């Protein structure tokens, strides 16, 4: 196990103990680059644990045209080392359906350990 994989495991244990389970699901219909035809639906689900953060990056919120009151920031640790929630994936947070609007991975060696995710209703 690499040093960063061990840090991911430790972060996952801490957020799992203090946060809540969350699943990010995105359904896409890829287009064949050769023919232009739409392919079959592909569903990707990323399992994780998350904690709600007190506020978020003001520049990110301004860029997205969002406010913290309707678009919380979450500290997310995915169950699989290296995974990140797909942008525009859907999830349930605080009893409401949300959509991923921004993902900022923390990846000191290029492989994400955790990420900050902005979701909106």
Image (cartoon, rainbow, N blue to C red):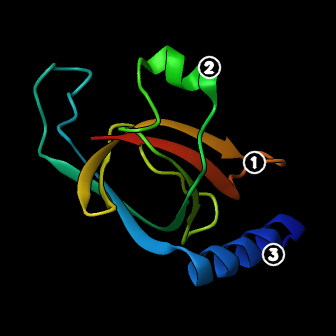
Query: Residue drawn 85% across and 70% down?
Result: 2
Quick one: label 1, few (<14), some, or many (20+) residues within 10 Å?
A: few
Towards the viewer: 110 or 31: 110
Spatial distance from mark 3 to mark 2, Cα to Cα?
Answer: 31 Å
Provide the residue designation for mark 2.
59
Provide the residue designation for mark 3.
6
Please say if 96 is above or below 30. below
Q: Sequence-wise, which precedes: disc 3 or disc 2?
A: 3
* Residue 24 x/y as whole percent: 35, 57
* Residue 104 x/y as whole percent: 62, 39
Q: Which of the numbered marks, if any, corresponds to residue 107?
A: 1
* Residue 6 x/y as whole percent: 81, 75
Q: Nearer the viewer, mark 2 or mark 1?
A: 2
Element type where label 1 sits in the image = loop
Q: Sequence-wise, which precedes: disc 1 or disc 3?
A: 3
Based on the displayed image, in which of its 4 quarters is residue 11 positioned?
bottom right
Q: Sequence-wise, which precedes: disc 2 or disc 1?
A: 2
* Residue 63 x/y as whole percent: 51, 15
Please say if 24 is above or below 67. below
Q: Which of the numbered marks, if any, corresponds to residue 39?
A: none
Please say if 113 is above or below 28. below
| Residues at circles 1 and 3 in contact by the CB criterion of under 8 Å | no
Q: Nearer the viewer, mark 3 or mark 2?
A: 2
Query: Residue drawn 68% across and 52% down?
Result: 112
């Amino acid at each position: 196990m690499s040093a960063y994989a061990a840090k991911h495991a430790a972060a996952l244990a801490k957020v799992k103990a203090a946060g809540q389970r969350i699943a990010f699901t995105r359904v896409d219909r890829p287009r064949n680059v050769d023919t232009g035809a739409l392919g079959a639906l592909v569903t990707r689900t990323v399992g994780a644990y998350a904690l709600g953060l007190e506020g978020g990056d003001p520049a990110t919120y301004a860029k997205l045209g969002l406010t913290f009151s309707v678009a919380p920031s979450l500290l997310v640790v995915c169950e699989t080392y290296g995974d990140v929630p797909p942008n525009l994936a859907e999830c349930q947070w605080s009893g409401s359906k949300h959509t991923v609007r921004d993902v900022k991975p923390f990846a000191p060696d290029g492989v994400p350990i955790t990420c900050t995710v902005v979701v909106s209703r």
